[in-house]
Structures are given as structure tokens and as C-alpha cells.
Image (spheres, rainbow, N blue to C red):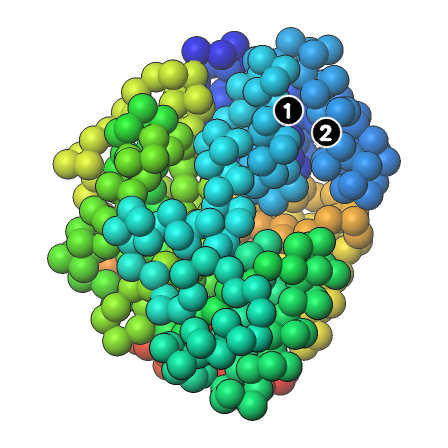
Amino acid sequence: MFSKILIANRGEIALRVIRAAREMGLSTIAVHSTADSDAMHVRMADEAICIGPPPATSSYLNVSAIISACEITGAEAIHPGYGFLSENASFAQIVEDHKIKFIGPSAAHIRIMGDKITARETMKNLGVPCVPGSDGGVADLRFARAVAEQTGFPLIVKATAGGGGRGMKLARSLEELETAFRTARAEAKATFGNDKVYLEKYLGAPRHIEVQVFGDGKGNAVHLGERDCSIQRRHQKVFEEAPGPTIDAETRARIGEICTRAVADIGYEGAGTIEFLYENGAFYFIEMNTRLQVEHPVTEAVFGVDLVREQIRVAAGKPMSFAQEDLQVNGHAIEVRVNAEKLPEFSPSPGRVTQYHAPGGLGVRMDSALYDGYSIPPYYDSLIAKLIVHGRDRPEALARLNRALGEVIVDGVDTTIPLFRELMLAEAVQTGDYTIHWLEQWLESHPG
Ligand code: MV4
């Protein structure tokens, strides 16, 4: 096992990793920008090193400063958290080249899944069901038309370097295909420096269901069920739950086994998420995330495992601490993402938090790096807390969410908490009957 790890991140996820490391007896190094000198992760870690000025490109994305921080402190491994460098294959490679352990999958696996055409092809070959569409890239309009003939309309043109909703264009008919194809390519070139695109049949009203997988890097893997993350706005998840309200045990086992076999076959290491669109009882692979996700705590709650501890274990060459038969869904968990944002525009609301009070009690977890008097800097993501509730069943989790939302105090900045208090009372949330489009429609009818 390592004795010292460096956390290349900030905010609640840095605390999350520090906590797991500390329970394992490891010492922790925080890195921070000059804007984060007073941040909680700096206070909570055993040591802290400043890696640059406020902009992330100069600090949390500053590869040489982070490698130097490892060498200066003697950190043996880096946990990247989520965002920032967590899915940067070149960074993972540089870390490996410096004989530092990257806590996560190999650079090769990150690279494969970062290119959506390669990811799709890889998954298809591994027996994972994909959205009907092109096999590989679509280099010209003639070929796009040929694929369309096979697949039918509506179609979606996606950038291979995209993901998370970036670089997609809808074509409802043959007439729209030319514009969609050209603009998708031009935007992909401008945004990612890569104009490769592919085509998929457009699914009209699916749910976003993602399967949590975990591998030991030696050909053993498990799944930890699914999360339903359909409630989102502009590709930002807002409310996530496990298990999926429409997924029964048999369906979970079936898609879970497909995903487990896929990651075992490639010798995947660490935590991963296989994302699907789910419509009319069928799963369609769209992307794989090769990192720990923001919403991992709902899975931790229902399976009773510490995913970060597990990441660190397998990175150190230890076996996973559970087998598939040890993993059973227990109850229901919901996470809401609390952002420092002003409604109805969802505009960033940085500033000083004059009073902070986290909710507590049975089945309530608040992951946050806030404290009384903390100033939220304007340079980074607006996520300031994740409220995770766990109950014996979905109604109990919802009741607990309602209760916990009433306890939270975050004064001095605007937050999305008032939104959640209303949102969770909506019929579709209460029944679990929603798709990826539900929230944006609901917001239109609830502009206040
Ligand atoms: C789609 C789709 C419909 N059909 N692909 C958006 C994010 C990216 N991960 C994939 N996305 C979509 N891909 C096909 N073939 C609809 C979306 C989509 C979406 C997916 C998941 C969660 C929220 C979404 C919101 C709008 C569109």
C-alpha cells in the first residue's frame, strides 16, 4: 500500500478522497491555486502545495506543477477526482512515466473511451448493445446518406471527441442531414481540433441510465447496479438516484453482467461508468466515463461500499474487497447537486458564505467543502454541496430528502436549494416517471 497520496482536485471531491485515504492510514497532499489558500481541502490534508494562480489552466490543470508537487512531497500516487485531469490520457501517461501511480484506469483505456467512435466500436465488439448508427466514422456526406438509408430518421451527428452533450447535431430528415453533418464537423474541428463525426439513430424520449462498474486491472470485475440520472438541465445533472425507478432486479442483473464482462475482458482497472440511453425496455450504450463520478455516493449508499477506498486498493495492486455475490441493493438513495447559482438563470453566485449548516440524522450525507465565512471563488465549478439521502425504499428516501432540504442553511450566496424543495414535490419526481427532457419542460412552466 502507498503511504502518501496527492489529490489533484479541490472542493468536496478532494475532501472525499482525503477521508478515504485517512481511514486507510495514508497521508494526504492537497494542491491548490492561490484562490484556494483558505479552502477546506487545504486545511484538511496533511500537507498542501500551491500549484499556481487562480485559472484552472494554470493550477488544477498544470501538469508539470502537479508532478513537481509529487516529487517534492514524495507522494507515490495521484487521485484525480472528477473533472480537471481525471480523464486526460496524456496526464495519466505522464504520471506513469514519472513512476507515480495514477489512481484510475490505464492511459490506454482512458484514451479508448475518450474517442467516442473507438469507445462505441470497442463496446459493440464486447457485446454491449449500442445505438443503431454508423460503424466507425462518417467522413463525407455521401456516406452519411448511405448510413441514414439504413438507420432512418431522426438521426444525430456526434463528434468523436465530444461527449457530455458537446458536439451533437440533430437531423430530422434527409434535407436536414447536410446542414447537420457540415455544422457538426465544423464545430467539432473548432472545439476539439478533431472533425471526426459519427451517426446514431436519435432516441426521442429516453432515460439516462448508467451502470457503475469496477475492475481490478487483472481481469476481475463487478458491477454495482445502475443510477438514473435523467433529471438534468443543459447536460448538467441535477438529481440522481439508485436504483433506477424503472429497473427491476432481473434487468439490473442482465445489463450488469454485460457491463461486467466487457470491463473484465479489457482488464479495466478502477471505477468506471457505462452510460446508456434506456427506452422501451432496451439499453443503448452512448459513452463510458473512466473516472469516479459526482453521483457515486448514491451507489455507495445502496451497496454499502466505499468506492474511493476500493480505487486506492486496486491502484496499489490489492484485490477488490468484495465479489459480485456480496453486492446487493439495499433501499434507495437520491442525490441533489447544490450549486451556488441564482435562479431562474442559473447564473454563478460566488461570494462569502455567512452561515453554513449541514443537515444530518439517519440516512443523510452532505458532501461539501463549505464552512462558515468561506468565500466561494468565481473561478471554478458552481457545485458547493451534494446532499445524499438513503431510505429503505424510494418514498422513505424522498421524505428524508424533503426533511433534509429543510435543515440546510447556506446564507450569503444564492443556491439551488429552493429549486429542489419545489422540484421534489412534482408528480414526475414523486412517481419516478420522467425522461431526459422532463426537467427542462418543468422549468419552463415553473419560471420562478
Ligand atoms: C443521444 C440522444 C438521443 N439519441 N443520442 C447528450 C449527452 C451525451 N452524453 C449524449 N446525449 C444524447 N445522446 C441518441 N442517439 C439524446 C442525448 C441527450 C441526453 C442524454 C443523456 C442525458 C441528457 C440528455 C439531454 C439531451 C440529449
State the mark number for residue 424: none
Q: Is residue 301 above or below residue 162?
A: above
Residue drawn at x 73%, y 11% as measured from the top left: 72
Between 233 and 255, the one nearer to me in the picture: 255
Residue drawn at x 70%, y 60% as measured from the top left: 189
CA–CA distance in space, label 2 to label 1: 8 Å
Chain-order first, disc 2 or disc 1: 2
Residue under numbered circle 1: 94
Residue drawn at x 61%, y 44% as measured from the top left: 83
- Look at the image and tell me whether residue 203 can be seen: no
79 with respect to 431 (left or right): right
Q: Please tell me whether mark 1 sits on a helix, a strand or a loop.
A: helix
- Look at the image and tell me whether residue 252 can be seen: yes
Residue drawn at x 25%, y 68% as measured from the top left: 282
Residue type beneath disc 1: Ile
For the C terminus, the image quarter is bottom right
Q: Quadrant of residue 261?
A: top left
Q: Is residue 176 above or below residue 322?
A: below
Q: Position of residue 255 (x, y in %)?
A: 23, 54
State the mark number for residue 63: 2
Is mark 2 in CB contact (under 8 Å) with mark 1? yes
Q: Quadrant of residue 234?
A: bottom right
1 with respect to 125 (left or right): right
For the N terminus, the image quarter is top left
Q: Position of residue 229 (x, y in %)?
A: 42, 62
Q: Is residue 54 above or below residue 155?
A: above
Q: Please tell me whether mark 2 sits on a helix, a strand or a loop.
A: helix
Q: Position of residue 120 (x, y in %)?
A: 41, 54
Between 423 and 72, the one nearer to me in the picture: 72
